[in-house]
Amino acid sequence: MTSNPANKPARRQRSVVSSFLCYGDEGTNNFRVSIFKRSDLVRSYKNKWAACSGSIENSDPNPLAAARREIREETTLTSADITLLRAGKSYSIVDEELNTEWTIYPFAFLLRDEGKGRAGIVIDWEHTTYALVKPEEVEERDTVPHLSKSLERVLVGKVVAAGLRELRDDHESGARVLAGKAVEILASAIRKGDVRGMRSMKGRDSESKESLEMWWRGFKMIGWHLKVARESMGAAITVAVCRALKVVEEEVITGGTPKEVETRALKQLEIVLDERRYNNGRMAMRFRIWLSDQFKEKKSISVLMLSSSSSIKACLVAALAGDTNHRIHLKIMESRPLFEGVAFARSLLKELKHRGMNRIEVEIASDASAGILAKDVDIVLLGADRISEEGDVSNKTGSLAAVLCAKELSTNVKVVVVSEIEKVAGPGKKEDHKEEDNDVSEITKHWPSGADFEATSEQGQEIVRVRNVYFEWVPAKYIDHYICEFGIFNAEQIKNHSEQVARMGEEMFGDL
């Protein structure tokens, strides 16, 4: 056991944020990041170039709030002037000279066109000047320790940046589709040569072990950014990305230059993408078998659903394609504000018409009609964007109302969740998962003319808050069956898989 010298104090632990203000198109020549030269009035790293940084205070609810506070204090820019581009994975470094272990939370923010812009940056006493430079030029400055490492953790290449924006802005596709898109982004990063940090392009085609390790670390970092791109869909994306990275890791272990590994890895990712296309079919067959067993004596089955789900569509098509004579009366809640339920009905009917199937009738009503639609139904059929370790299911807002109404108004109704197993999240209660609050204009644009009232009082206090939350939780106690590609799962099997997801994420990203 090593003892601490009597005259040496215990090492300090400090958590700090490090934020880069950016403008331009990421991954292009016009992209710039801000760096600030620290004054000789600060306590550490005097006259060094740094990001907009500072300690996380006890009053800060989270690192992101601390980052915004520091930006406001050091530049006068507020949330009206900047928008979060990306949060990087935190990391720790030790400065022996200062006897301090720093835990650094890196962020990148875009200067908003409608805000103050670059001209709005007004530095305080902590800095003497600032510069807007190309990302690769940061290394040329005399910086605080590991500034380039922080920057590498928040920036990606042009192809990956476009893919992350697509994941963030796609509010029509379900978790399964977005998880598939995440794997496709990994493949595209290889195809387009976009696996890079600031330094990882150097020696990319060399045969050195260091070059391959650099490539693999950069590729895993892309996976990490994909994993956190959509928190509400995070479970499915995390599992899909980790499984894809695992097959690439096997190619890294086999060895070779980054270019050789990329060639083999791309072939493996294409196999992964092909396999994903079969999962829906397997799950749909499980549903068809369950439906036949459950309703042997019933010819007409009433089903209530909402929103749009590729999993539900596959299950319904499979059920109608079976050798039974079941007829389905499908009741769909239109699913505001984007009306995905309407789009789902159109897509389903087009598919059935193409297949020559007509044993279905469809009824569509507003979300507010949940109590009417839920009367005398046999099944409430839910997709899932996330399943907690306890079996609670996150699905489109309106799901809980549909379930509660059906339980009250329909005798022997079964609440069935059809979902690929990858949507089971790691350990954590449903309350731990962040709500996804979206653009309220999606709601207000449908309001009648003249309905735009003042949202604040004369004193500037908020008195009206408009919310656009896409997803809500249905507690496990209301769910009768979970049907996935591997069969019908129970709560214990869900919990076991949740633990596997946690191990998978830690094994893949724990060393980043």
Image (cartoon, grey):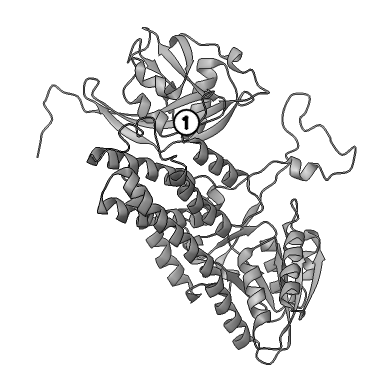
Task: Give how far across and how far down residue 115 sits, in percent.
Answer: 65, 21
Q: Amino acid at mark 1?
A: Phe
Place residue 297 in its image quadrant: bottom right
Q: Nearer the viewer, residue 213 or 52?
A: 213
Where is 368 relative to 75, above or below? Answer: below
- What residue do we see at 29% from left, 50% from top? 252
Task: Give how far across and how far down residue 364 sits, in percent.
Answer: 81, 66
Left or right of residue 322, residue 28 in this image: left
Q: Nearer the viewer, residue 489 or 163?
A: 163
Quadrant in which the C terminus appears:
top left
Task: Give how far across and how far down residue 323 sits, in percent.
Answer: 65, 88
Residue matched to label 1: 107
Visible residue check, residue 147: yes
Q: How many numbered marks appear?
A: 1
Where is 122 relative to 419, above or below? Answer: above
- What residue do we see at 31% from left, 38% from top? 205
Label 1's element?
strand
Q: Nearer the viewer, residue 177 or 466?
A: 177
